Image: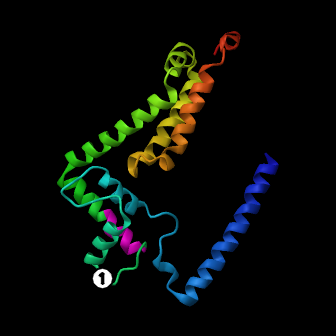
């Protein structure tokens, strides 16, 4: 545990040093407070609404979101805090205006996720129900990780790059379903 904590501490020092160098560069060449720290969240959610053909003209294309933001404010910097606020307001307005569209999009994405479940678990369903489902202490954490990793393809797009964690948990479910857990009965599990 000590080595883990020391490793985390050292890597945080290195990352913070890189961030400080980046911020100094931006300060002298641009406005450092202008850009979002981390990933652009609302940009991804907005483009994720373009999974199905729609009347709003949303497609999974960065240029669609950029064009919309430029219409609202021609002087906007891409991926700035103001840009994220525009994307957030567009998502919220779309949810208020057409919640049925949002539900259809989520269910369509979930349908694609179900196909991945069928592909990567297939015959493993039998073993999961027969063995793993009965051992709740192993099944629940795996199911929690599976559900958490389902969030990313539902928010963005159900592409393999967003599904990689989800697929990893499907494979883990298959692997853990093959073990014999009868030895745990003597420990009251």
Magenta part of the chain: 80-88
Q: What secondary structure characterizes most of the magenta part?
A: helix
Residue beneath disc 1: 74
Horizontally, is 159 left or right of 24 in the view? Answer: left
Which residue reaches farthest right?
A: 3
Against 64, is 189 above or below? above
Work out whether residue 124 or residue 186 is closer to the camera in this orientation and state it. 124
Work out whether residue 58 or residue 19 is closer to the camera in this orientation and state it. 58
Residue 38, given in percent of the width and then of the height, sits at 52, 65
Residue 149, given in percent of the width and then of the height, sits at 50, 42
Residue at 61% x, 78% y is 22
Instruction: Please identify the quadrant where the N terminus is shown.
Output: top right
Is 139 one of the magenta-colored residues? Answer: no
Is 83 one of the magenta-colored residues? Answer: yes
Residue at 77% x, 50% y is 4
Residue at 50% x, 50% y is 161
Structural crowding at the residue carrying mark 1, measured as other residues with C-alpha within 10 Å and reported as few (<14), some (14–19) or many (≥20): few
Residue at 68% x, 67% y is 15
Residue 53, given in percent of the width and then of the height, sits at 24, 52
Against 101, is 31 above or below? below
Against 68, is 102 above or below? above
Horizontally, is 116 left or right of 110 in the view? Answer: right
* Quarter residue 44 falls in: bottom left
Instruction: Please identify the quadrant where the C terminus is shown.
Output: top right
Residue 11, given in percent of the width and then of the height, sits at 73, 61
- Element under label 1? loop
Which residue reaches farthest bottom?
A: 28
Which residue reaches farthest front?
A: 119
């Amino acid at each position: 545990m000590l080595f883990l904590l020391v490793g985390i501490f050292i890597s945080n020092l290195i990352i913070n040093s890189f961030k400080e160098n980046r911020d100094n560069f931006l300060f002298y060449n641009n406005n450092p407070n202008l850009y979002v720290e981390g990933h652009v969240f609302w940009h991804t959610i907005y483009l994720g609404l373009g999974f199905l053909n729609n009347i709003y003209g949303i497609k999974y294309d960065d240029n669609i979101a950029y064009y919309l933001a430029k219409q609202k404010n021609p002087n906007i910097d891409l991926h700035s805090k103001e840009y994220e606020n525009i994307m957030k307001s567009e998502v919220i307005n779309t949810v208020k205006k057409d919640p049925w569209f949002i539900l259809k999009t989520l269910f369509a994405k979930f349908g694609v996720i179900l196909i991945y479940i069928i592909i990567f678990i297939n015959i493993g369903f039998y073993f999961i129900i027969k063995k793993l489902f009965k051992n709740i202490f192993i099944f629940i954490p795996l199911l929690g990780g599976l559900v958490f990793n389902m969030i990313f393809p539902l928010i963005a797009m159900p592409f393999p790059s967003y599904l990689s964690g989800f697929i990893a948990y499907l494979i883990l479910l298959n692997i853990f379903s093959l073990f014999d857990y009868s030895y745990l009965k003597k420990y009251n599990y």
